[in-house]
Amino acid sequence: MSGIRRYLNPADLATAGYLSVIVILSIIFSHRIPLWWVIWIGHGFAIALIFMIAKISQPLATNPEPSRLFFIRSWYPVALIPLVYKELEYLIPRIHPRDYDHELAAIDYAIFGAHPTVWLERVTWPALTEIFQLSYTTYYFLPLILGAVLWRRREFDRFQFLLFVIVLGFYLSYLGYIAVPAIGPRFILASEQTFPLTGLLFFDFIRSTLDRAEGITRDCFPSGHTELTLLVLYYSYSFHRRTFWLLLAPGSLLIISTVYLRYHYVIDVFAGALLTLLIIAMAKPLYRLMGDEER
């Protein structure tokens, strides 16, 4: 383990660990995964690449001055996240071929006495829908904004810690999608809704673009949009208060939009918030245990 730690930082270890878990799952369920060998080769290559990047850039650990190599070393885990996400559309129904939408919808109904997405029809109007759809897309930028702020301020220790937290947050939510697959209320409760959502200018374009990009990934539980947004808000408040105030409004609207736009059940949001608290509680101890210390 000491040899690994000499090269790999906590974000590397979290990334390699998740890729290894997917390899193990693809081995266990290889009888249901026709392209299992592609998963093995692709993930093995990615893990080897992580080691290579870490080893080549090892001298930067003692002299972390900005350079192309340092930039690649620091940001490659972020670039890998959407690639890893995309494979879930293929893997989830083969690893766990059962959806839990009806159970999640039943929990919501038991809590509220109604389906929240159906109840929200009474406050639904195109201008509000447009605002929420635009806010929903900020999910893809909030972590990048905070990371870029820390990078620009040359707060590299904090940046590396944030990188670890973000990577951990994404991959734990991905494992949640595998454990509890669900496609969301906009599909399961479509017959309960009395009218479709409509916006003003960009709603249809954004929604259709996201649908094409993400596909049917069964990525409802827990709500990664809630989890990652709360993580960014928490650490922006801790690291750079001005950025927190900048992100608070779009982040808050984003979380509300997950239910308003019929992407998530409320129980998904609760689970995402609970996962956020768990990550915050264990992030610093785990970061130190995995070979580094947040300063």
Image: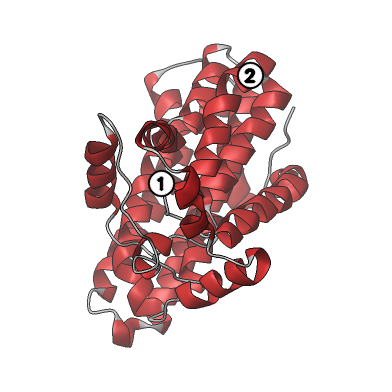
Q: Residue at x 36, y 46 (%)?
A: 82
Q: Earlier in the sequence, mark 2 or mark 1?
A: 1
Residue holding disc 2: 245
Residue 113 vs 256, above or below: the answer is: below
Secondary structure at numbered mark 2: helix
Residue 109: x and y in percent read 59, 69
Residue 54: x and y in percent read 47, 40
Q: Report whether residue 272 is seen.
A: yes
Tell which of 155 and 9 is nearer to you: 155
Q: Quadrant of the C terminus?
A: top right
Secondary structure at numbered mark 1: helix
Which of the 4 quarters of the picture holds residue 113?
bottom right
Residue 126: x and y in percent read 35, 36
Q: Residue at x 70, y 25 (%)?
A: 237
Tell which of 107 and 277 is nearer to you: 107
Label 2 packing within 10 angstroms: few (<14), some (14-19), many (20+): few
Label 1 packing within 10 angstroms: few (<14), some (14-19), many (20+): some
Q: In the image, 34: left or right of 30?
A: left
Q: How many marks?
A: 2
